[in-house]
Image: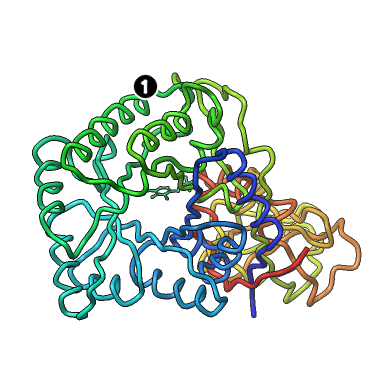
């Protein structure tokens, strides 16, 4: 195996518990394991999160939902599974078959589900969670006539039931965001329509990792607002962290985009869960003038010892981590020390400088991403966010104890 991902069961559990504690009593915490648990392995992480206390897990689509359901069942666990990224006609049978709960926003999607229940011969209605578009303009039903029409249709039939109503914030990491306040007002309006339609959802949910991090216990914060809104509807409140579970969280930003403001509630206590590892497959000595890798962007200025690691951009190691003489790039951890990447990161191979690290040999373990080199380090060098870095890692996961 050229590289693999080790998942710390203790850290994943601790992160879930920290997020749940900060979210506060009375707010359930759905654990988002979509996108293969942000590159960490959904079937590996889902049972750990369910054992940590998650009543709900969030997946991308019905395919991932079926895989996660199988992993949970094998572990003797039965949390509910929310399908978060859309529903097409082809997906409806799997919703019924695997006991999934889809996010829906159109009458057509609900008709597909009703037909699937008819085909299955089941007498049990299927639960759906209705997404309200409060400002993201991605998924969700629009306020006004579109929402009223969907609610009327739902109220008039028995094969589906409205188990949840939810929305998603566009600027959760912005302190005192006017956009979030605006979205909250729209969501309140949607909840009034739901009540007027005579529907009584069991769950009302909104918010992500940053919602918990950003003013979790403040009177004006989104979580206090959510708890009150859910209570007023006789429903349970729920928040949906993803990235925080895996040990990362965006910095809280000020509304005008300058500097970091507000006291983060969970960010300092989160621990990265993923250690992406590989092994040295070659070592060599080079002298002054020796060029390294494609296009010779790095030229040795002195005698150096180099180690070759069988990981590259095909595996999700960003090419922006390449190191030239003019610009230092990323690094890996070898024998607990930083080994700078020299030359271009190529498809499946990367060269690191181990001149100052004693006794490096073929077969030595290398940390590509983990303690000593975080997803935030990779993100800074690649000019992106930690989300994209961890989601991009392509290696199989295994659970490890600390
Ligand atoms: C991905 C996602 C989340 C989790 O967001 P994080 O920022 O990773 O905590 C929550 N809700 C919805 C609707 C999402 O799509």
Q: Is residue 354 left or right of residue 332?
A: right
Q: Is residue 16 left or right of residue 234?
A: right
Whether residue 293 is visible, yes or no, is yes
**How many marks do you count on the picture?**
1
Q: Is residue 61 left or right of residue 399?
A: left
Location of residue 51 (image quadrant): bottom right
Identity of the residue drawn at 91% across and 62% down = 358
- Where's residue 192, x and y in %? 23, 33
In the rendered view of the protein, which quadrant contains the C terminus?
bottom right
- Decide which of 1, 347 is in the foreground and name it: 1
- Decide which of 361, 88 is in the foreground and name it: 88
In the image, residue 98 sits, relative to residue 164, either above or below, namely below
In the rendered view of the protein, which quadrant contains the N terminus?
bottom right
Tag 1 residue: 178
Assign a secondary structure to mark 1.
helix
- Where's residue 16, x and y in %? 60, 51
């Amino acid at each position: 195996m050229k590289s693999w991902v080790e998942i710390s069961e203790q850290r994943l559990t601790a992160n879930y518990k920290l997020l749940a504690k900060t979210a506060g009593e009375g707010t359930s915490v759905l654990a988002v394991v979509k996108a293969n648990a942000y590159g960490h392995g959904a079937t590996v992480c889902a049972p750990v999160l369910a054992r940590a206390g998650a009543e709900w897990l969030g997946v991308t689509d019905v395919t991932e939902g079926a895989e996660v359901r199988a992993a949970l069942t094998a572990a003797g666990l039965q949390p509910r599974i929310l399908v978060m990224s859309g529903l097409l006609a082809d997906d409806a049978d799997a919703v019924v078959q695997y006991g999934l709960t889809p996010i829906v926003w159109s009458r057509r999607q609900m008709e597909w589900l009703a037909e699937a229940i008819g085909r299955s011969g089941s007498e049990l209605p299927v639960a759906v969670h209705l997404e309200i578009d409060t400002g993201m303009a991605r998924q969700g039903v629009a306020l006004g006539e579109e929402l009223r029409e969907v609610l009327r249709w739902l109220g008039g039939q028995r094969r589906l039931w409205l188990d949840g109503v939810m929305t998603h914030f566009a600027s959760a990491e912005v302190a005192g965001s006017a956009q979030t306040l605006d979205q909250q007002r729209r969501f309140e309006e949607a909840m009034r329509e739901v009540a007027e339609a005579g529907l009584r959802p069991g769950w009302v949910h909104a918010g992500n990792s940053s919602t918990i991090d950003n003013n979790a216990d403040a009177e004006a914060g989104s979580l206090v607002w959510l708890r009150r809104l859910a209570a007023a509807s006789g429903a349970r409140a729920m928040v949906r962290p993803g990235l925080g579970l895996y040990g990362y969280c965006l910095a809280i930003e000020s509304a005008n985009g300058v500097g970091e403001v507000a006291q983060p509630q969970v960010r300092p206590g989160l621990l990265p869960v993923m250690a992406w590892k590989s092994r040295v497959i070659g070592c060599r000595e080079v002298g002054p003038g020796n060029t390294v890798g494609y296009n010779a962007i790095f030229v040795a200025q002195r005698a150096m010892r180099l180690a070759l690691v069988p990981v590259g951009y095909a595996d999700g190691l960003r090419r922006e981590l390449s190191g030239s003489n003019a610009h230092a790039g990323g690094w890996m951890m070898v024998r607990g020390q930083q080994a700078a990447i020299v030359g271009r990161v190529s498809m499946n191979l990367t060269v690191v400088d181990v001149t100052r690290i004693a006794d490096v040999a073929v077969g030595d373990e290398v940390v590509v991403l983990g303690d000593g080199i975080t997803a935030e380090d990779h993100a800074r060098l690649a000019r992106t966010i930690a989300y994209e870095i961890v989601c991009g890692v392509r290696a199989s996961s295994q659970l490890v104890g600390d």
